[in-house]
Structure formats: structure tokens, C-alpha cells
Amino acid sequence: MPRPSGPPTVRLRLLAAELQELRSAARLTREQVEEQAGVNQGTLWRIEKAQAKPHNGTLEALFELYGVPAERRTELLELAQAAKTPGWSHTGPQQVHDAGYAAYVAFESQAKAMHNYESIYVPGLLQTEEYARASMVDGPPMERAVIDARVRIRTERQAVLSRQGDGVEPLQFWAVMDEALLHREVGDRSVLRRQLQKLIDEADRPNVTLQVIPFSKGAYPWMNGGFVRFVFGSAAPDLIYEERLGGSVFMEREEEVDRYGFVFDQLRARALSPRDTIAFIAKLMTS
């Protein structure tokens, strides 16, 4: 079983997360997988931790046991074949569990911290259910069932802000937002008002930091963009995620991560302080 030389790439980490999710969905332990598919428990552990690149034969045995559809098998095999290639992008129709979205959710659950800049919508981890639904209904065309599923998943994802357990701490979330999104009536005025109140409420968490860049600051670099930095600590290298019109992109090269880190530092230096941000949002609610 080949081991990656150096840190695992985003593709190998995505493959590992997908395989672990498939095993969980099949409700199988590693011991049961060894008994039924002949894949050693230690080998499977290394695969699911992105510490080893699986052979095609191993993948096929796992796919058969997990009941993976043929189309999905092809996608995962292609992902495994390109596991040494840094970076990853995904284009295509928005499904409930498309590869880009599944990757984002997997990395979000594994990260120790996230740095998020948004200029269009409130960050997903801070959205009310009705705001999230309105943003999807008014966004690119999606089937109603897909919207319902994505709203449910987005709401469930917010549990990372309050997760607890043995050795598990809540996600440290730092968001910088452009003032424009605090005025944009996603849904209607009442939906926006309740969303602003949720921002104030979420900011009470010790692990959530919010900052707003007000209109009075004028134009600034990256004003019309949006990105996320996943911080994994010593467990793995950080990742950058950016959603573009043509699809989603993950970046992992050190120079790319450093560049986005520098941009985020510049953005939060330009923004209001966390305390002034909450006062600013509260004032908007009374205007």
C-alpha cells in the first residue's frame, strides 16, 4: 500500500473522507470490512486517514461492499489516480451531494478553525434556516428536493460550532463580512432582521468572531470575492476554498495558502472590531 511522500494532497484527503463516509453509511466497522472484503483493518485506517493511497483492487472491493453506484465508482477511481496532483476543482450541476459540496462539508468537520470572508451572503454556518432557503430559492436553479436537502444539511453543519466530546473542541470560526450583505434582503425584510439577530446571538459564543467592513471604509482589495481557509493545525496542511461561477476550487500550495492568509489579515485589519461590529449590526436593526 503506497504511502504519500510528504503531506497528503487535497485529493487524497477528499478520497479518504469519502470512503469513511461510505463505510459509515453502510454501518460497518473496520473489523466487519476486513471480514467481508478482506481489507486489513490497519490498511483501512491508513486509507481513511489519508496516510496511504489505495490500490484499485482495494477500492473495488470496498465499493462492492458499500454498494457504491457505478458512476460514483468512476469518479472516486479518477480521484485516486490523480491523488498526487495538488489542488482540486469541481464543475457541474449542483446536486445534494455533488463532489465539491461533499468535500467542503468533510473538511469543515475536520478543521480546527475556519477563516471566512463573504461579500454576498451571510456565512453558511451563521445562517438561519429561512435565510438559507431563500438564498437557494433565489439562486441558481435547483430542484425543490435538492433545496430541502441542502437546507437541512446546512443547518446540521452548524453543529461544529458547539461540538463537544473526548478531545473534540468547537470549531474556531472567524468571519469578516462586507456591510452590503447586512442590507441585502434575502427573502424579505423580516427574514433579514431575524438573520441579523442570529449574527448577534452567535457572536456570544467564545469560539465565534465576527467583523464587518463598513461602507465608510471605501473600496478595498478582494471586495467582491469570498473564500474560506480551513485550518487543521498539526494534523494536516491548511486548505483554501473558493466558490466561483464555473465551480468550486480547493488550493493547497503553500504560496497560495499564504497569499490568502495575507489577504484575510488585511481584511480584518480594515474591518470594525468585533465589539464595534455587534453594535453596528444592532444599530442596523433599529434603523
Image (cartoon, rainbow, N blue to C red):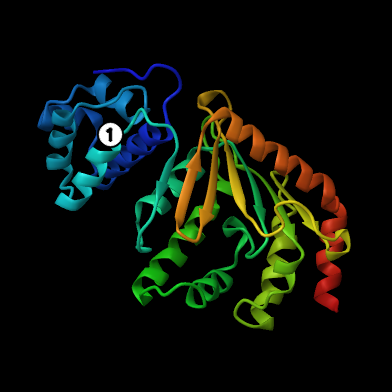
How far from the left and from the top, in percent, is residue 121? 62, 65
Q: Position of residue 85 (x, y in %)?
A: 38, 31
33 relative to 145 in the view: left or right: left
Query: Left or right: where does residue 285 sit relative to residue 90?
Result: right
As rendered, which of 251 and 122 lies closer to the eye?
Answer: 251
Q: Position of residue 184 (x, y in %)?
A: 69, 74
Is residue 69 visible in this depiction of the protein? no
Residue type at tag 1: Ala
Residue 58 position (above or below residue 262) = above
Q: Is residue 127 left or right of residue 153?
A: right
Q: Residue at x 24, y 34 (%)?
A: 29
Using the rendered view, name the quadrant where residue 7 is placed: top left
Foreground residue among 96 and 92: 92
Element carrying mark 1? helix
Residue for badge 1: 80
Q: Based on the displayed image, in which of its 4 quarters is residue 188 positioned?
A: bottom right
Q: Is residue 37 left or right of residue 189?
A: left
Q: Quick one: quadrant of the C terminus?
A: bottom right
> Compared to 34, does 211 lie above or below?
below
Q: Quadrant of the N terminus?
A: top left
Residue at 71% over, 76% down: 193
Which sits in the foreground, 172 or 245? 245
Percent x, y of residue 60: 14, 36
Image point (36%, 20%), residue name: 4
How many other residues sit within 10 Å of disc 1, few (<14), some (14-19) or many (≥20)?
Answer: many
